[in-house]
Image (spheres, helix red, strand yellow):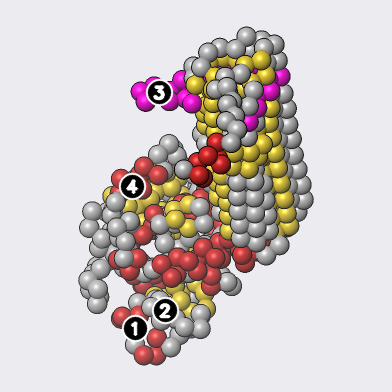
Amino acid sequence: MADLAAVILAAGKGTRMKSDLVKVMHPLAGAPMVAWPVETARQSGASRIVAVIGHQAETIREYFAGQTDISFALQKEQLGTGHAVACAAGLLGGFTGTVLILCGDVPLIRSQTLRAMAETHTASGAVLTVLTTHVENPCGYGRIIRGFDGRVIRIVEEKDATPEERSLSEINAGIYCADAPFLFEAVSRLGNDNAQGEYYLTDIVTQAAERGLRCSAHAVADPVEVMGVNDRVQLAEAARHARRRIGETLMLDGVTIVDPSATYIDRGVVVDRDTTVHPGVHLAGETRIGTGCIVESGAVIKGSTLGDGCVVEPGAVIRNCRIGNNVVVKAGTVMEDAMIHEHAAIGPMAHLRPGTELGPQVKIGNFVETKKITMGEGSKASHLTYLGDAAIGKNVNVGCGTITCNYDGVRKHRTVIGDDVFVGSDVQFVAPVTIGRNSLIAAGTTVTRDVPPDSLAIARVPQVNKEGWKLKKREE
């Protein structure tokens, strides 16, 4: 819609959360709670967004830093929802269009609902439209009072309601659509003669009725859309609904989620078609998974990109990694800040630490740890190895028990291993050291000097056999 702005009410502390963190910044399916209505306002067509903030204002500002379509109004004293909207008026000075008013603790409202409400507002010629719904237990909500012609004439808060009014099931969702000139003039005239001593935004409905102006209602069929979050029980419930929506969207786009109720996919995650996600999987952050992948039970993937045809086995943990096509990440592997090229195989039980880059068709086996290394195409370290601060060429075989001794107690040093090198078992490279291409390092060798190309390096204490020694010791 043209000329649409949004005000997000997010100043309250949220004492029922019993937390040192302000309520609207509690995470919900991958984003702070307040980020949900902000994004929904954008999707609804709002070109200007004002967030009214109070408690931990800088924390909220920092999260939205760099988002140029949002500005902030500070509500130093929380004197009610009407007062909060009045605080935002200055930042929308001169704006004459339509204003959406949303709540920072009502995260599940859909953009389709807001657009429909805005259309109802325009078509009815109303100055104010209230979003309502019907619930079986309206306890705690403001009730909608209609006139003889069905128009909304008043909203009464539960504390101020009569027993008859409390019996009504149509509630105020706390979301509004209003003509800007009416809205800002009306909130400037609010009083606080009520049980709470606050400036209720709901009183502008009464103002409209008294002035003969139309106030419409737009009902939402699903009460989940307007559920408020006041404590951690409700936060968990809202997250469950949010993830259900995310899962349904992915499944309708061609992703198989074996058990959506036992799968945790956050907002912003992208999964391409013909990928299968098994129960117990966690997908979070800016994660993207390609076509035809399999993510098995218990895998955790955060902030990573996986190419087409990848397999992630049970219990793997992948954070901030870039993974090419047809890579297999085997069970129990942990990877962070790593880059893996196509057709590589990792694990099981491998640990790839930050700075690892593995070329095509590299194999990293069980109980191998890497850190700040590059490893060329076709190389492999199959088991029980530590490789840190190293550049390893193509087609290198690293034997079991190999260690790059990269730290001298003061500084880190690098090991360089050329192409086509064969490293036997139980080898130690005391860095800095360079191994020339096509060399062989014999099992049990401790390498302290550079090895020329095409060489055999062997450094062992000569074996001594003392025959009969064991029998002699027994006699003694």
> Is most of the magenta stretch helix, strand or loop?
loop
Crowding near the residue tagged with mark 1, few <14, some 14–19, many ≥20 C-alpha atoms within 10 Å: some
Circle 3 packing at 10 Å, graded few (<14), some (14-19), many (20+), is few
| SS type, badge 4 | helix
Judging by the rendered image, the residue that carries numbered circle 2 is: 143
Q: Which label number is shown at residue 119?
A: none
Q: Nearer the viewer, residue 243 or 464?
A: 464
Please state which of the two labelled residues, at mark 4 or mark 1, is closer to the viewer: 4
Q: Is residue 420 magenta?
A: yes
Which three-letter amino acid code belongs to the residue tagged 4?
A: Thr
Q: Three-letter amino acid code at disc 2? A: Arg
Q: Is residue 162 above or below residue 302?
A: below
Please provide percent x and percent y for residue 397.
Answer: 69, 27
* Residue 2: image location, x then y, percent: 54, 47
| SS label for mark 3 | loop
Q: Which residue is mark 1?
A: 161
The answer to whether residue 352 is visible is no
Asked whether the beta carbons under mark 2 and mark 4 sit within 8 Å of each other, the answer is: no
Give the Cα separation between the discs numbered 3 and 1: 76 Å
- The residue positioned 68% from the left and 23% from the top of the image is 422
The extreme top residue here reads 452
